[in-house]
Amino acid sequence: MRVKLGIRIGLGGLGLVFSEFKAGSVAVVELVIGDISCVEADVIVNAANSSLLGGLGVDGAIHSRGGSEILEQCKKLRATVWPDGLPTGCAAITSAGNLKAKYVIHTVGPIWRGGLQGEAELLKMAYWNSLKLAASHAIKTVAFPSISTGAYGYPVKEASCVALKTIKKFFEKETSIEKVYMVLFSEQNFNIYLDAAKQFF
Ligand code: ADP
């Protein structure tokens, strides 16, 4: 069910087109256009790569705005829990450095290889495991980028369906999470997610 569509001033001082959808009794999904590294949410999810040592796109923005604390913690994760790197579909948490968030959850989406290599299941796992990890830290708000749709080449339309269906399913169970922001980097991607949201909510 669509709740609102409008322009919001906030979330890091940007004027953002947004659209809100209800998902469960308290939970709301809000689609916004913006830079995820500027968003004020308890958790910002990073579209990381397996190395956890930084990259371009979302990863680059989060590390450059968040500062060295995030990278230091990622290096510790590599030295301890994930010596071979974070597997695709898994999620790991660090503090958020200078970002306006409590935590960054790093997850690795699949590289698009035509759609028959389990990409949809892996993308679903990336969203699901990030939400599960956020909920285990008693988090109320989570901001996601459109995982895998940049350097990893996942078509945005297909990815939007996986992302929103997974978030909706997650909200079918009891959770501390009250709001999920889907932060889209362009109006074009926002409109693709909007079409999918109208279908699923
Ligand atoms: P992946 O490697 O998982 O594809 P990318 O970071 O390359 O991750 O891109 C994922 C999506 O995030 C793409 O749609 C891209 O346009 C978008 N994006 C890139 N930078 C930002 C940012 N700073 N904030 C929000 N979205 C971003």
Image (tube, grey):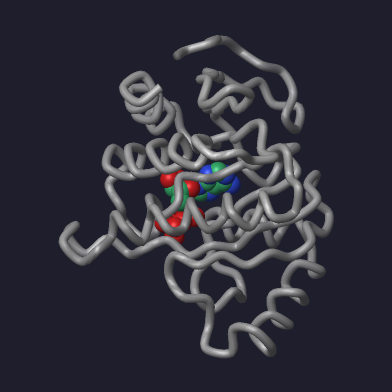
Q: In the shown orientation, is residue 33 left or right of residue 164? A: right
Residue sticking out furthest to the front: 174
In percent of the image, x 74 and y 65: which residue is there? 94
- Quadrant for residue 59, please give it: bottom right
Q: Nearer the viewer, residue 183 or 129?
A: 129
In percent of the image, x 59 and y 89: which residue is there? 83
The answer to whether 182 is drawn above or below residue 144 in the figure is above
Q: In the shown orientation, is residue 150 left or right of residue 6? A: left
Q: Image quadrant for the N terminus?
A: top left
In percent of the image, x 56 and y 19: which residue is there? 17
Give how far across and how far down residue 103 sits, in percent: 75, 55
Give how far across and how far down residue 20 sits, in percent: 54, 19
Give how far across and how far down residue 196 sits, in percent: 33, 27
In percent of the image, x 80 and y 51: which residue is there? 102
Q: In the shown orientation, is residue 104 left or right of residue 31? A: right
Q: Image quadrant for the C terminus?
A: top left
The answer to whether 67 is drawn above or below residue 82 in the figure is above
Give how far across and how far down residue 165 sits, in percent: 38, 37
- Quadrant for residue 142, please give it: top right
